[in-house]
Image: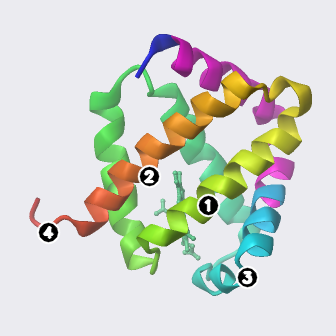
């Protein structure tokens, strides 16, 4: 991953952090508006879920310079998502909802460059998670 892609994602995420609870809420609104059938997969308190999501994205964004450390974390996350009933086709819907939320949160700071950088980073995360969900349990 290119250093400017990483910098664009890390710098823009810093601008989201102060509004993290609102961004999480908006994200789930966007997600369930795009596909109401996904709601049933979420069993717990959505505020707590939003906090976990934002923490995980923060951890991932901070580790973009250290993929050796990030990949195993994402593999574990991807395997758990398989158990939650998450399927490959859901990743596209989530990615679109995430990009929409970032656009709403960042406003004019969500430039085409920032959008492209996030698209790439989400794509890498989703690829690693999806592959891990399909891998045998012993791998
Ligand atoms: C980069 C992508 C994603 C990230 C960073 C992410 C992050 C998280 C985190 C941190 C949790 C808390 C539980 C755990 O750590 O195992 C979680 C749970 C969950 N996520 Fe994701 N997720 C992603 C993609 C998705 C997708 C594509 C779906 C599909 C709808 C999804 C649906 C869920 C569900 C259903 C739960 C469990 C909720 C519950 O237990 O009630 N996530 N996610």
**Residue under label 2:** 126
Q: Residues within 10 Å of mark 4 (few under 14, many from 20)?
A: few
Range of residues picked out in magenta: 4-25
Q: Is residue 30 left or right of residue 116?
A: right
Give the Cα distance between marks 2 and 4: 18 Å
The mark that comes first in sequence, 4 or 3, is: 3
Asked if the residue at tag 3 contacts the one at tag 4, i.e. Cβ–Cβ closer than 8 Å, the answer is no
Q: Nearer the viewer, mark 4 or mark 1?
A: 1
40 to 86, vertically: above or below: below
Residue 22 forms part of the magenta stretch: yes
**Residue under label 1:** 94
> Could you tell me which residue is drawn at 28 percent across and 44 percent down?
72
**Residue 22 x/y as whole percent:** 86, 50
Say whether residue 19 is visible: no
Say whether residue 78 is visible: yes
Task: Give the quadrant of the C terminus.
Answer: bottom left
Asked if the residue at tag 1 contacts the one at tag 2, i.e. Cβ–Cβ closer than 8 Å, the answer is yes
Beta carbon at label 4 within 8 Å of ligand 1: no
**Residue under label 3:** 36
State the SS at label 4. loop
Task: Between residue 49 and residue 133, name the one nearer to us.
Answer: 133
**Residue under label 4:** 136
């Amino acid at each position: 991953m290119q250093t400017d892609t990483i910098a664009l994602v890390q710098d823009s995420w810093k601008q989201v952090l102060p509004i993290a609870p609102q961004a999480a809420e908006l994200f789930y609104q966007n997600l369930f508006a795009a596909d109401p059938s996904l709601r049933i997969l979420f069993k717990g308190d959505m505020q707590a879920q939003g906090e976990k999501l934002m923490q995980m994205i923060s951890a991932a964004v901070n580790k973009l310079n250290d993929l050796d450390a990030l990949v195993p974390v994402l593999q574990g996350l991807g395997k758990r998502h398989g158990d939650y009933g998450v399927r490959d086709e859901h990743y596209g819907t989530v990615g679109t909802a995430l990009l929409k939320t970032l656009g709403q949160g960042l406003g004019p700071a969500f430039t085409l460059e920032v959008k492209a950088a996030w698209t790439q980073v989400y794509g890498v995360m989703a690829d690693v998670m999806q592959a891990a969900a399909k891998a045998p349990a012993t791998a």
